[in-house]
């Protein structure tokens, strides 16, 4: 490199070494000898290290490009600007017009970089500093660069609003600030800069709406995806005659799509997905150059009309998926000569999809009509689309019986059908596997789940050379046609869940994902199954009738990350090697509902990767292994319903990620309250019911559970689930909790679902006031203890609570009015068998509960109990300050009050003395109140079964 520079003469004015590979060598310092250089381009040349001070000596430079684009390198070289820093580099480059430093780590912090640039380079027109680790806010000194035309600041972290002065750059043609931590309301007037051609605000927390556009606006590209822009699209958007790219996906736009958009004749790319648009779709009859239309994830309502769709001669991609579109799908879409992808999935299209013709020549490669309400036969003309690679028709009401017969002289089994790579025919009422799949030599993914396929799975499936994903779940298959061993292909995923397979577990080729759960296999695990697990990461055989001991050869599956043997009849002890596997890759171990005995091996390694350990409902005994403290990634620990005899596991307080702790129905004993215990800030489900815990409720422990408090990790707004990612597969954790008297199995544990169950122990002392801070709590059960004192009024702040059980304690005092006023979603209440006194607050949700909720409190009175309060007025909400200061009776209202009393007696009299009327009244008042105060929907999938008696 040095030799090359020696040959260069002193009068050289332009030098480009871009897109070479100098193997991470530093930029040579001898560049300073090129004193007449006006153009220097070293972009993506493979240089690395500190940018030399020699560059700052090139005082005649007009263009400097040192940028790095990671797309061009497997290992991205690292250029830094620390010593010299940005100030030193540019202080002598006063003639610079274009500066490109993208991808360079610039050490200048805060808004100092703005002042440096505006002071040193007054003539700058192009400023490109994407992914430079810059911070904000963007300083007002930048507006001194009056000639700025291109501003490119993507991928920084400004954490500030977009400055208003950007609209004052009279020559601005491009503003690109995607993924830059910008926030606040975006200034509308920037859109109206007459010279602006490109604006990219994507992936920022910006708010705002589109302005009215005048005809003199020059916009060609408008990218606002993944922002908070909202409102409706202005009709004047049709004035943007030069517009070729629109990306408004994942915003908050609503309303109809303006008809004026049909006049955007230069449009090439349109993406308005993930919004709230409604109405019909404008006819893009003039958009001759449209090549990409994406309106997915909207709430568009109406029909797609066939009028003028055939005029979209250049349309290549049409994506209207994830909307509320309905009506027929016009078959005139299919013959469009340039169409490459047609995506209409997840809508409400209905009716029969008709056969179509005039399909040659045709370039259609992808057709996705899944998750609609289409019915009737699947058109066989689809299989005449010779270029088709992806065909997804799943989850409709199709009748696929015609796929098994010759149709109008066209034989689906012939070699003339397209070679499909991805085929989805789930929920298509198929009764056997289509034979035309046999000739699909390119088939990569086949989904035939949720059909009516019965009998034997044919052997030829194993001979498809490219098959990697096979889903036959939720059918009626009984056997696998053999032999299927010694086959050469390697699949990634085999899903045979919920069929009727019987007998011994079959040996299949090695796969990454293998699911035989919910079948009728009835045998011990054969040793030969170990061959199938050589490369397996996910293995589930839950919900079968498998028995015998857990064989040690499972521990030879060295890539295993998920193992589910639950709901079988396995017996014997837990193999020690299985526990030790958590030190390699094993993340999920579920042995629930078996007949395992012995102790839990105390061999969890130092590098334990477990995220879920579920071994509830076995016959395990002994102590909880202390080596569990090594599992720092543990999120779910469920050892309920065993015979574990131990004290509370204080030594697990280092498991900061723990979200679910279930010790229910064991033999744990001793106190939980501990002055130095402050673990588990993420804990959201704790169930220690039916043990022998004693002492006060753990105040210190409770005060650390941030996950059930209102400010916890945005839990109120995001309905995320607790899951484990295993490669490209996801496992949803599931646990069983007691809710409203029933065992509820949460198949998807929402991160906002929170429950505390300390019932059936020997806790005493008062109920801590701190529980009132757990405003995200859904279930609270402290029943069957020896708790004393009054019910804290702070429980009235638990506004999300659905179930409250404080029964069978020694609680005293009155029922706080705050409970009746604050617990608006409460559907289960049990305060029975305490020592409560006074009048029951018969208002709001409390008026919906039966006497069973309050029985066993001899000094409680009022509805719904039969015992009446003799000398007390019914407890109502506390009077306002104004009402408490009134001392004079307004006699002119006395007649109205007497009328109220008379009417009240007519209603309440029968309630007290007429049983039939009382039953009818409570039944219908309950229905009315639940319509007024609907229970918060959790979105959990669960199975119910009678609760165990504690």
Image: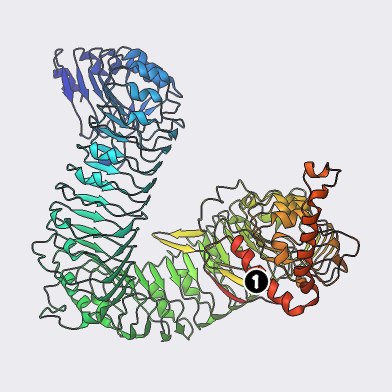
Q: Is residue 642 visible?
A: no
Q: Is residue 306 visible?
A: yes
Q: Residue at x 18, y 70 (%)?
A: 382
Q: Image check: 75 left or right of 13? A: right
**Percent of width and height locating residue 689:** 72, 67
Residue receiving disc 1: 924
Quarter assignment of residue 211 = top left
> The C terminus appears in which quarter of the rendering?
bottom right
Q: Nearer the viewer, residue 192 or 799?
A: 192
Look at the picture and state if 400 lies above or below 859: below
Q: Nearer the viewer, residue 562 or 345?
A: 345
Quarter assignment of residue 496 = bottom left
Q: Nearer the viewer, residue 461 or 305?
A: 305
Q: Residue at x 15, y 67 (%)?
A: 385
Total numbered circles: 1
Look at the picture and state if 617 lies above or below 363: below
**Percent of width and height locating residue 319:** 27, 55
């Amino acid at each position: 490199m040095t030799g090359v520079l020696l040959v260069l003469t002193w009068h050289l004015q332009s030098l480009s070494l871009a897109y070479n590979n100098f193997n991470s060598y530093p930029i040579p310092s001898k560049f300073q000898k090129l004193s007449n250089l006006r153009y220097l381009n070293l972009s993506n040349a493979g240089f690395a290290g500190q940018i030399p001070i020699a560059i700052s000596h090139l005082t005649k430079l007009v263009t400097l490009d040192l940028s790095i684009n990671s797309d061009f390198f497997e290992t991205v070289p690292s250029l830094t600007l620390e010593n010299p820093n940005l100030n030193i580099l540019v202080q002598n480059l006063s003639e610079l017009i274009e500066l490109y430093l993208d991808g360079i780590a610039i050490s200048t912090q805060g808004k100092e970089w703005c002042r440096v640039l505006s002071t040193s380079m007054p003539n700058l027109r192009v400023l490109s500093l994407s992914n430079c680790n810059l911070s904000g806010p963007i300083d007002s000194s930048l507006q001194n660069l009056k000639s700025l035309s291109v501003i490119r600041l993507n991928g920084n972290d400004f954490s500030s609003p977009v400055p208003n002065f950007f609209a004052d750059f009279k020559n601005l043609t491009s503003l690109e600030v995607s993924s830059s931590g910008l926030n606040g309301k975006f200034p509308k007037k920037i859109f109206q800069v007459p010279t602006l051609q490109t604006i990219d605000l994507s992936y920022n927390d910006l708010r705002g709406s589109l302005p009215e556009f005048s005809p003199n606006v020059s916009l060609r590209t408008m990218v606002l995806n993944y922002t908070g822009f909202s409102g409706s699209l202005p009709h004047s958007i049709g004035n943007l005659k030069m517009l070729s790219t629109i990306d408004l996906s994942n915003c908050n736009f609503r309303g109809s799509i303006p008809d004026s958009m049909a006049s955007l004749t230069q449009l090439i790319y349109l993406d308005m997905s993930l919004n709230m648009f409604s109405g019909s779709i404008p006819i893009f009859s003039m958009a001759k150059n449209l090549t990409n239309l994406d309106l997915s994830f909207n709430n568009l309502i109406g029909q797609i009309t066939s009028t003028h769709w055939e005029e979209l001669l250049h349309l290549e991609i049409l994506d209207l998926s994830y909307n509320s579109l309905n009506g027929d799908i016009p078959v005139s879409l299919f013959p469009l000569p340039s169409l490459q992808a047609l995506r209409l999935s997840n809508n409400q299209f209905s009716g029969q999809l008709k056969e179509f013709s005039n399909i040659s020549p045709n370039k259609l490669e992808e057709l996705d009509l899944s998750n609609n309400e289409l019915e009737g036969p699947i058109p066989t003309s689809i299989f005449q689309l010779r270029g088709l690679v992806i065909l997804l028709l799943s989850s409709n009401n199709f009748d696929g019986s015609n796929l098994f017969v010759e149709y109008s002289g066209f034989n689906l089994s012939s070699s003339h059908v397209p070679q499909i790579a991805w085929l989805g025919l789930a929920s298509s009422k198929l009764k056997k596997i289509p034979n035309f799949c046999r000739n699909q030599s390119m088939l990569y993914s086949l989904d035939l789940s949720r059909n009516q396929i019965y009998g034997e799975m044919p052997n030829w499936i194993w001979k498809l050379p490219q098959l990697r994903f096979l889903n036959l779940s939720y059918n009626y298959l009984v056997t696998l046609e053999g032999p299927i061993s010694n086959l050469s292909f390697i699949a990634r995923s085999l899903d045979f869940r919920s069929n009727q397979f019987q007998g011994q577990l079959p040996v299949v080729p090695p796969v990454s994902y293998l699911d035989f759960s919910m079948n009728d296999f009835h045998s011990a695990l054969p040793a030969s199954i170990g061959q199938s697990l050589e490369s397996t990461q996910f293995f589930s055989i839950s919900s079968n009738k498998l028995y015998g001991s857990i064989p040690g050869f499972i521990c030879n599956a060295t890539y295993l990350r998920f193992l589910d043997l639950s709901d079988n009849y396995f017996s014997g002890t837990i193999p020690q090697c299985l526990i030790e596997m958590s030190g390699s890759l094993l993340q999920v171990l579920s042995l629930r509902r078996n007949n395992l005995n012995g102790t839990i091996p105390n061999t969890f390694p130092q590098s334990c990767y477990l995220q879920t350990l579920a071994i509830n409902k076995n016959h395990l005994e002994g102590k909880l292994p202390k080596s569990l403290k090594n599992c720092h990634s543990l999120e779910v620990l469920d050892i309920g319903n065993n015979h574990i005899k131990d004290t509370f596991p204080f030594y697990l307080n280092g498991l900061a990620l723990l979200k679910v702790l279930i010790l229910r129905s064991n033999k744990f004993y001793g106190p939980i309250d501990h002055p130095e215990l402050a673990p588990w800030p993420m804990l959201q489900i704790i169930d220690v019911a039916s043990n022998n815990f004693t002492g006060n409720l753990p105040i210190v422990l409770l005060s650390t559970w941030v996950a059930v408090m209102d400010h916890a990790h945005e839990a109120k707004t995001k309905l995320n689930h607790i899951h484990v990612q295993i490669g490209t597969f996801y496992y949803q954790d599931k646990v069983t909790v007691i809710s409203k008297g029933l065992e509820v199995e949460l198949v998807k544990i929402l991160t906002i679902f929170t429950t505390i169950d300390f019932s059936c122990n020997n806790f005493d002392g008062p109920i801590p006031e701190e529980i009132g801070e757990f405003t995200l709590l859904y279930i609270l059960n402290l029943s069957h203890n020896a708790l004393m004192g009054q019910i804290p009024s702070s429980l009235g702040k638990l506004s999300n609570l659905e179930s409250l059980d404080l029964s069978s304690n020694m609680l005293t005092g009155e029922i706080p009015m705050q409970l009746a006023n604050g617990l608006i979603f409460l559907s289960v209440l049990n305060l029975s068998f305490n020592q409560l006194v006074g009048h029951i607050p018969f208002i709001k949700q409390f008026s919906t509960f039966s006497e069973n909720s309050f029985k066993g409190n001899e000094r409680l009175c009022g509805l719904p109990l039969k015992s009446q309060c003799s000398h007390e007025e019914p407890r109502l909400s506390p009077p306002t300050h104004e009402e408490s200061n009134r001392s004079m009776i307004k006699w002119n209202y006395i007649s109205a009050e007497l009328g109220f009393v008379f009417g009240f007696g007519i209603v309440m009299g029968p309630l007290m003395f007429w049983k039939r009327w009382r039953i009818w009244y409570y039944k219908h008042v309950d229905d009315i109140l639940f319509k007024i105060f609907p229970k918060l929907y959790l979105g959990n999938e669960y199975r119910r079964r009678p609760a165990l008696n504690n």
